[in-house]
Image: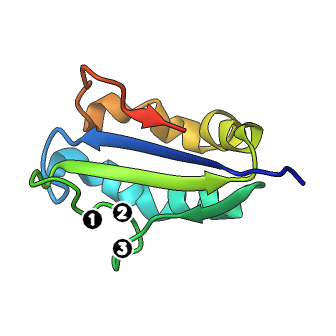
Amino acid sequence: MADYEIAQLNVGRAVAPMDSPQLKDFVDRLEEVNALAEASPGFVWRLQGDNGNATELRITDDPRFIVNLTVWRSIDDLWAFTYASHHNQVFKRRFEWFERLATPNVVM
């Protein structure tokens, strides 16, 4: 077991409100993707609100700006979930649902 864990935070601004038809596929897959993360090797914790995900948590006045915060046992575990699991199919579609930001949107 490592002497550390890795936290990753990513932010995004949705192209439309969460309850819009444009984000329906994204919202419909949140529960599936969160369950996949929680069942993945190395998963430790994820930020979530009363709705079971972090889409309702506000860190700005903009309701379309959302955050995702997770903790993993290692960078390799996070990489495997992000790119080598079914999450990859959702990740590939991110720009259908989120604006391309001019600044970095991920920190570890």
Q: Which numbered dot is residue 49? A: 3
Task: Answer whether labels 2 and 3 touch (C-beta < 8 Å).
Answer: yes
Mark closer to the chain start, 3 or 1: 3
CA gap, disc 2 and disc 3? 5 Å
> Residue 63 appears in which quarter of the rendering?
bottom left
The quarter of the rendered structure image containing the C terminus is top right
- Count of numbered badges drawn on the protein: 3
Q: Which residue is at 76% across, 54% downward?
A: 42
76, 96: nearer the viewer: 76
Q: Rounded to the nearest whole Å, what is the CA distance between mark 3 and mark 1?
A: 6 Å
Q: Amino acid at mark 3?
A: Gly
Instruction: Indicate whether 84 appears above or below 18.
Output: above
Q: Residue furthest right?
A: 1
- Say which amino acid is labelled 2: Ala
Which label sits on residue 95? none
Q: Are marks 3 and 1 in contact (CB under 8 Å)?
A: yes
Residue carrying label 2: 54
Residue carrying label 1: 57
Q: In this image, 81 relative to 48: left or right? A: right
Q: Residue at x 9, y 55 (%)?
A: 61
Quadrant assignment for the N terminus: bottom right
Query: How many C-alpha atoms fall within 10 Å of the one at disc 3: few (<14), some, or many (≥20)?
Result: few
